[in-house]
Image: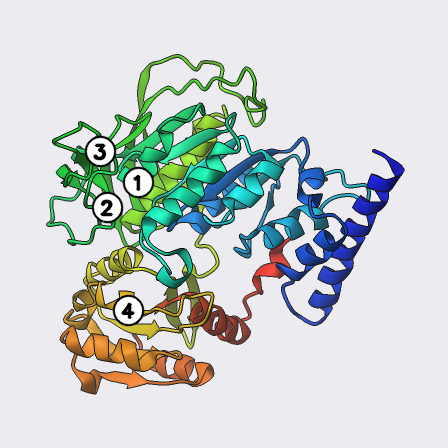
Amino acid sequence: MSKHNFIKTFLSVAACRLTRSGLRVLHRGGTTLPGRSAMLFDKQILEVVSRGMHIIVVTGTNGKTTTCSMLRNALQENGIEPLSNISGANLLTGITAEFTALSTLSGHPTKKYAIVECDEGALKKVVPLIKPDVIVVTNLFRDQLDRYGEVMHTLEEIRKGVSLVPKTTLCLNADCSLTSSLATDVPNPVYYYGIGETAASKEETDGLSDAKYCIKCGTEYKYGYHTYAHLGGFYCPKCGYKRVNPSLNVEDIRITSKGSDISIKFTEFKPDVSSGKSGNKTPDKQSENGKRSRSINAHIGLPALYNVYNAIAAIAAFDAMGWKKTKIIDSLASVSSSFGRMESFNYNNVDIQMILVKNPAGCNQSLTYLSSLGEDYVAVFCLNDKTADGHDISWIWDADHEKVATDPHCKKIYVSGTRAGDILIRLKYAGADTKNIELIEDGRKLIDAMTSHSMPVFILPNYTSMLSLRAELSAVTGKKEFWKDQK
């Protein structure tokens, strides 16, 4: 490294560290400003401080944070503490902050492994700098229309990022026709994962689809089966584009309120790593990678179908890295909820679960989870329309709020947030008794009210409303802020 480059790197790292330290003295997380400070001195500092690391990147509409949490938990249980943007600051500045703050003053990484959550739109800026071994794409749904536009725009943003790292292995959801299409005309090794027909629910589909027509020829898809929304056994009757038989296929699912038990059939994946940096040998490289089938049972410590998808995405990434899949499968039983995603609290001896919702598909899965519990509960809907949420909140009319609004086990509903009136009207039209709905703006008063009942409480907030209410809950329950757990 030249003297000039050394000085740039030194100043970048020092600025990042000082900014983060100052913010934390002020009891703020410091997730993006330290990255901006570092980039003032070197816009490419992320490339320097990630050099030589083995990295998994997770992107997609839903499930990024939980999938990263599952991967991180697996490494931790095997004695490895990876670098990870735990806070969910997943744009270039936030990711730069994490890597830079944990490097030496000369820019050398202090960790060997990283699990990185990356925003779909930021992928093209991030991956050319960190050159990941694996990119996981969880799914693609309509989300924050005023920011991302239609889902095809999001798909193209991801495609641009993938095209910049042709040696990186892609882990793609075979059940998502949009995600699967990323494999078209790319040289990357591709590992598919999915849920098979024998494991799919026999219940009627929720009717939502953000990919109704074939991405290749425009003909309406047919389905052998659905899991939810547009995910499932899709096929085009005209051009033949269809769900790929994946390397990881779930054959059976049993979900309870305590977690999920699944049976997985593996067809061994053997990536071409001759020219890439994949094939790192830790933890415990697999001794055999031949093409053979094997079935394994797994218990996931989180309930709901979407967490099954998150788990198999994490397993696929682990397998694609060349690591023993049993290492992550064994760890899934102990995985805990992550920042606002089925995160649990207890206050006034009442169990509280916070489930982030931000688009129709994810919201429907959360509503299905609540209505399937078969026990009395309190529901709390929090809705903001700030920039990080997307100013367009019309998506609430596409979600099936009827599942909770008319559920006899839902004994009380609270609404809050800058657009609380909108969600109240949506619930009214969904069939909820307005006498049973109460609007409370103050966060602390909301917590006291919702825990005045003896029933469990389920909070369904969107992003910024989750952040503010989570801070209130953390204060009254003594839970640490997310950044206090960061290394």
Near mark 2 (Cα within 10 A), the count class, few <14, some 14-19 or many ≥20, is many
Earlier in the chain: of badge 2 and badge 1, it is 1
In the image, what residue type sits under mark 1?
Leu
Q: CA distance from mark 2 to mark 1?
A: 7 Å
In the image, what residue type sits under mark 3?
Gly
Q: SS class of the residue under badge 1?
A: helix
Residue 470 vertical position relative to residue 268 in the rendered view, above or below: below
Earlier in the chain: of badge 1 and badge 4, it is 1
Mark 1 and mark 2 in contact (Cβ < 8 Å)?
yes
Q: SS class of the residue under badge 2?
A: loop
Q: SS class of the residue under badge 3?
A: loop
> Which labelled disc corresponds to residue 196?
3
Residue at image mark 1: 178
Viewer-side residue, 288 vs 320: 320
Viewer-side residue, 14 vs 87: 14
Image coords of residue 401 (percent x, y) = 21, 67
Viewer-side residue, 322 vs 273: 273
User: Residue at left 59%, top 50%?
Assistant: 92
Q: SS class of the residue under badge 4?
A: helix
> Which labelled disc corresponds to residue 41?
none
* Quadrant for the N terminus in the image: top right
Mark 4 and mark 3 in contact (Cβ < 8 Å)?
no
Earlier in the chain: of badge 1 and badge 3, it is 1
Residue 10 vertical position relative to residue 381 in the rendered view, above or below: above
When asked about the image quadrant of residue 361, the answer is bottom left
Residue at image mark 2: 211
When asked about the image quadrant of residue 466, the answer is bottom left
Q: Nearer the viewer, mark 2 or mark 3?
A: 2
Near mark 4 (Cα within 10 A), the count class, few <14, some 14-19 or many ≥20, is some
Q: CA distance from mark 4 to mark 2?
A: 19 Å
